[in-house]
Image (cartoon, coloured by chain):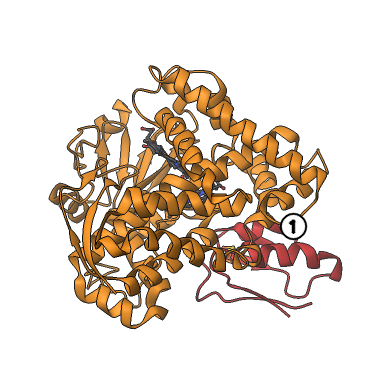
Chain colours: A orange, B red
Amino acid sequence: MMQVADSFETLPFLDVADPNFSIRSQAVLNARDESWCAKTPYGLAVLRYDDVLKLLRHPTLRQGSYRWPTHVGVTGLFARWWENMLLSQEGENHARLRRMANPAFSPKLIKDLRPKFEILANRLIDGFAAKGECDFIAEFTEPYATGVICDLLGLPFEKWRELADIAGDMGLALGVTYKQDLATVDAATQKIFDYAEELVALRRAEPSDDFIGTLVKANEDKSKLNDQELLDMIVLAIFGGIDTTRNQLGLAMDMFIRHPDQWALLAEKPELARAAVEEVMRVRPTITWVTREATETFTYNDLEIPKGTTLHLFSQAACSDPTVFPNPEFDITAERNPHFGFGGGAHHCLGHFIARGDMTEALKLLAQRLKNPRFNGDVSWLPDSGNTGAIKMPIAFDPA
Amino acid sequence: MKIDVDLTICLLHGQCVIAAPEVFSFADDGSLVWVTDPDEGLRADAEAAADACPEQAIIIS
Ligand code: HEM
Ligand code: HEM
Ligand code: SF4
């Protein structure tokens, strides 16, 4: 990585390792004006729309976080899963796993879940609407995101707390304290695998055409999806679907509280909910960057990028790039170029039909039932980089 | 069976290439190419590709 820094003296520098670094800071905008890319303590940051679009699909790049457990010097249950699951795989192995998983994530299967999303959202809103206030994360986005996964897996909603806690403990693996938290992380990983095994046993005994049933069907030919890969995929759906959705919906509320006219418009025109999801993910994506790693030395925009270099593709900065978004203000009625909130290319989010479906339902109902939402105390935030979002968001509103 | 791709919304993710490699592929210049009237035997693959396409750009008729 020093090599990159040395050979590219002229590139701007962004200290993404600084705990106070913000992906939305003026420093990032200045760097984007100056160059298509910046140096960081961990490699390069790609800042402009066209370059993020191209590099997400670049054949010389592989997904970049597969090495995380090795990087922190950890082995164990979580590490084994992380290194073997879909997101960490490339080429033919990735393609095979993705082909096997696709039917379980298909838009047809998801359509059947839409009415359940509506019931879930209304049930949660019923729980706090009369008070005129709530912690939007604890009382809505977290139980909603987890409840959606319960619906997907065919688990009763009552399981949500347990599932959220397990996923939270597992999530410690992605923080800098992974090594210290290893016992907690691996205990949670064991629990989630026990869950997955139980669900699989149920579907083997009683075949079905729901999410797990569809994966179990793919597992009939073990050479295409073996037993371990089946469980790894179910665990990825649980782990990858909860915090992402929780965070993204919290960020949506943050945007709308700052743009009350847009919230009123959404309440009036619920058919805008789908576009609202896209516009929120453009200006305020929870996954603010995705990482890629160069598998070979290659040249891009006249820059020689050495093998092993990590590239952070800044979805957040790219989607306010003035050359593509001349009027970048938050506007749910605007026609826009596509955002990168679900990544792109071979690793494009497999759960996006689910996430788009559940967030559309949620925003539609929230806008109708919570009028004039406003902050009602201090909001606690994750760092404004990497995977971001609110962990506590007290709000007040006028019940409709 | 006839296959069409709405190239105005296709974003070249290549999910169709993963789902149905005998129908879809990338040309050397990076553009998407596909068999416009594949064998009926490839229908299941083609439908899997149409389902998997994140932009829902594939039309089978
Ligand atoms: C708002 C919610 C969500 C967001 C913002 C999101 C975002 C993303 C992003 C950015 C990636 C690509 C990462 C990369 O290229 O490095 C991804 C991949 C993935 N997501 Fe999501 N996701 C969400 C919800 C879900 C849900 C609900 C599920 C499952 C039920 C899911 C399952 C997956 C899987 C399996 C992958 C890996 C795909 C592959 O490697 O081929 N996601 N997601
Ligand atoms: C399918 C689901 C997921 C996808 C596609 C995904 C994507 C990614 C990617 C691309 C990175 C690399 C970023 C980097 O190296 O800085 C990463 C690392 C990270 N992810 Fe996720 N992630 C998923 C699930 C989660 C969940 C559920 C959490 C939160 C509990 C999380 C939190 C983190 C954190 C904190 C890092 C930083 C680790 C590092 O510095 O390398 N991710 N993830
Ligand atoms: S999956 Fe869809 S968007 Fe991607 S290349 Fe194929 S047709 Fe285009």
Q: Quadrant of residue A210?
A: bottom right
- Toward the bottom, the furthest residue is A268
Determine if residue A349 is in view: no
- Asked which secondary structure carries label 1, the reply is loop
Q: Nearer the viewer, residue A198 or A342?
A: A198
Kindly tell me whether mark 1's CB lies below 8 Å from ligand 1: no
Q: Position of residue A211 (x, y in %)?
A: 67, 53
What residue lies at 52% left-to-right and 54% top-to-bottom? A148
Instruction: Tell me the quadrant of the picture where the N terminus of chain A can be found.
Output: top left
Residue A144, compared with residue A312, is above or below; it is below
Residue A44, compared with residue A34, is above or below; it is above
Instruction: Tell me the quadrant of the picture where the C terminus of chain A can be found.
Output: bottom left
Image quarter where ligand 3 lies:
bottom right
Q: Position of residue A274 (x, y in %)?
A: 42, 72
Q: Nearer the viewer, residue A61 or A206?
A: A206
Q: Position of residue B19 (x, y in %)?
A: 69, 57
Q: Position of residue A281 (x, y in %)?
A: 35, 60
Circle 1: residue type: Asp
Callout 1: residue from which chain?
A: A
Q: Quadrant of residue A44?
A: top left
The residue beneath circle 1 is A209
Q: Nearer the viewer, residue A259 or A384?
A: A259
Number of marks: 1
Residue A171, compared with residue A346, is above or below; it is above
Horizontal side of residue A140 vs A262, given as left or right: right
Horizontal side of residue A273 vs A96, given as left or right: left
What residue lies at 32% left-to-right and 42% top-to-bottom? A386
Determine if residue A158 is in view: yes
- Toward the front, the furthest residue is A130
Q: Residues within 10 Å of mark 1 (few under 14, many from 20)?
A: few
